């Protein structure tokens, strides 16, 4: 990749703005936008305590914002080539500010759902506009092995930092002040655009918005919200015992079939099915599924342990989670060195990511004790942050290497982010919480059958100590030791083996299982044939 001979310039800035600080101004703006949202993870407990909203309602609003971010990926470049930077950033900031004013002013779910969805769209559009304008400043040769790690510094810092900031604000002040703070930062973004910048569009001839399959995009959004509703409210409504959830599943399947029909029949579909024909795309998405399931399970169990067992306040938990940031930065440095500097193959990098998940799970397994101070969990969180950064960057880089066409890459990013956001979020809360409760109840009933009054001296029996010890033992045996440690260790070993060329080429030569089975049956028939 050849380096550009033209010096880096940002033509949207006015002449009096020094060139050296121009990209830093955009970096500050993108951090302001990334710290925004419709609802804030760190303030969920405070909002639930002062309103009539359940925790399921607030999580549904959170995932609605993520759905808006994911579904807007195919539209990002079309919007950039249609509007000026000033229009996009001022519009995104204004929309986020208005949405924050609405979310702190009402508890009506019928209003909050579309508001959070729109806020998610504005957030991803503003982020893309800022980062695309400073891409050549970050890496003049447009090396995505450099750009993606730097991008994830911004994204992952904002994810953890915004939750911590919202929790601190909600602890010391009314939770609405976080929304007031966001409105203030959005006013700052608008002020910067109006005073320091001028309208600029990279396309001399504006690209029209005609021909976009917006209908399918809206149907996909509805499908994502239906899936979120099922996963978030599933445990509360007793899953398929609820007639409402059975209807949701039936309508979601019908809607999915109709969306697939449209994608195959529309001339220019919102998401082209050709992206699945690119080499390694399906494999990358499968690895993403496994990684997010492992990280989602760990994060859910971690939340249960800290909230239900240790009884930590929200600001204490989010403050402890800040220790994942050193791990994030270490993971970013690893990927930057691996992909941007050395240009090594990605197999061993995947192994490093899953290996960090394994170490994190093992440390949490052995530290799960009420007598352990919470500061002892710092190194586990560092490894969790490192795993998340390494896998997020390497998977996105692999997807870009596989899908070369720009339009198809952003369509692939839509699917990637649906897996990336929902499996770690909605499924983690719904499925893992339900499974955890089931196995805990099952263990309690089995173990309790051996505990009888005839075999226990109740005057000498410490019921509180027994329950605490048993609860912790059940958490360890059911969730960590039996599933996550072994699964993450298997993935680590598998990618270490795939890094060996002889193993990788040997696997590629193995025929499909039906072919292998037919050949085996043919050999067995030959051996058992009775000679005449």
Image (cartoon, rainbow, N blue to C red):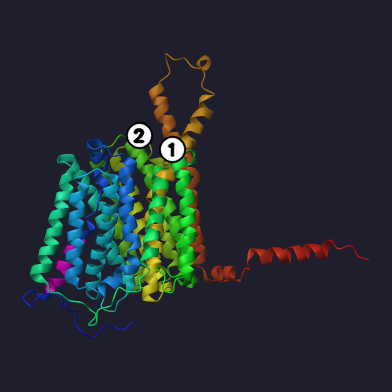
Dot label at residue 309: 2
Task: Name the foreground residue: 208 vs 175.
Answer: 208
Q: Quadrant of the N terminus?
A: bottom left
Is any atom of residue 362 visible in this view?
A: no
> Where is 74 relative to 365, above or below?
below
Tell me the residue at 50%/32% (across/down).
443
Circle 2 crowding by C-alpha within 10 Å: few under 14, some 14–19, many from 20:
some
Which residue is more in the foreground, 311 or 16? 16
Say which element carries label 2. helix
Q: Main secondary structure of the magenta part?
A: helix
Q: Which residues are magenta?
A: 20-31
Extreme residue in the left direction: 16
Q: Is residue 171 left or right of residue 269?
A: left
Please tell me which residue is depicted at 25% across the width and 61% down the height of the picture. 122
Label 1 crowding class (10 Å Cα cut-off): few <14, some 14-19, many 20+? some
Secondary structure type for disc 1: helix
Q: Quadrant of the C terminus?
A: bottom right
Residue 201 image-quadrant placement:
bottom left
Tag 2 and tag 1, C-beta contact below 8 Å:
yes
Locate residue 465, reporting x and y percent. 39, 25
Residue that numbered label 1 is attached to: 475
């Amino acid at each position: 990749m050849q380096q550009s001979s033209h010096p880096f310039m940002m033509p949207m800035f006015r002449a009096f703005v020094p060139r050296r600080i121009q990209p830093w101004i955009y970096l500050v703006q993108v951090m302001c936008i990334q710290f925004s949202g419709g609802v804030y993870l760190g303030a969920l407990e405070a909002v639930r305590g002062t309103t009539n909203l359940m925790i399921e309602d607030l999580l549904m609003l959170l995932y609605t914002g993520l759905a808006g971010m994911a579904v807007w990926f195919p539209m990002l470049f079309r919007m950039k080539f249609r509007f000026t930077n000033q229009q996009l950033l001022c519009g995104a900031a204004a929309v986020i500010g208005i949405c924050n004013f609405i979310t702190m002013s009402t508890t009506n779910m019928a209003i909050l759902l579309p508001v959070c969805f729109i806020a998610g769209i504005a957030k991803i559009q503003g982020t893309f506009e800022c980062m695309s304008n400073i891409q050549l400043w970050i890496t003049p040769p447009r090396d995505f092995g450099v750009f993606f790690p730097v991008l994830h510094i911004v994204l992952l810092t904002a994810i953890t930092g915004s939750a911590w900031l919202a929790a601190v604000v909600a602890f010391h002040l009314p939770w609405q002040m976080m929304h007031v703070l966001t409105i203030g930062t959005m006013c700052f973004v608008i002020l910067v655009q109006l005073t320091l910048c001028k309208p600029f569009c990279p396309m001399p001839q504006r690209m029209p918005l005609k021909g976009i399959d917006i209908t399918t995009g809206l149907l996909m959004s509805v499908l994502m919200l239906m899936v979120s509703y099922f996963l978030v409210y599933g445990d509360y409504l007793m899953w398929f015992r609820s007639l409402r959830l059975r209807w949701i599943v039936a309508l979601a399947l019908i809607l999915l079939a109709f969306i697939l029909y449209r994608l195959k029949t529309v001339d220019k579909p919102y998401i082209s099915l050709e992206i699945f024909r690119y080499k390694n795309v399906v494999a990358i998405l499968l690895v993403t599924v496994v990684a997010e399931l492992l990280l989602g399970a760990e994060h859910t169990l971690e939340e249960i342990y800290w909230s239900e067992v240790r009884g930590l306040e929200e600001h204490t938990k989010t403050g402890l989670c800040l220790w994942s940031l050193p791990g994030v930065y270490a993971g970013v440095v690893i990927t930057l060195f691996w992909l941007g500097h050395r240009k090594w193959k990605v197999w061993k990098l995947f192994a490093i990511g899953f290996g960090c998940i394994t170490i994190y799970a093992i440390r949490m397994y052995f530290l799960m004790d009420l007598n352990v101070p919470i500061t002892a969990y710092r190194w586990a969180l560092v490894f969790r942050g490192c795993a998340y950064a390494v896998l997020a960057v390497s998977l996105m880089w692999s997807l870009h290497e596989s899908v070369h066409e720009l339009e198809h890459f952003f369509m692939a990013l839509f699917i990637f982010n649906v897996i990336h956001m929902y499996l770690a979020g909605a499924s983690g809360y719904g499925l893992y919480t339900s499974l955890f409760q089931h196995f805990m109840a099952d263990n309690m009933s089995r173990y309790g059958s051996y505990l009888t009054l005839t075999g226990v001296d109740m005057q000498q029996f410490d019921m509180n100590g027994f329950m605490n010890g048993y609860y912790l033992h059940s958490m360890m045996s059911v969730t960590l030791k039996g599933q996550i440690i072994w699964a993450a260790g298997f993935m680590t070993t598998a990618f270490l083996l795939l890094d060996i060329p002889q193993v990788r080429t040997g696997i590629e030569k193995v025929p499909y299982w039906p072919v292998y089975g037919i050949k085996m049956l043919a050999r067995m028939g030959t051996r058992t044939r009775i000679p005449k």
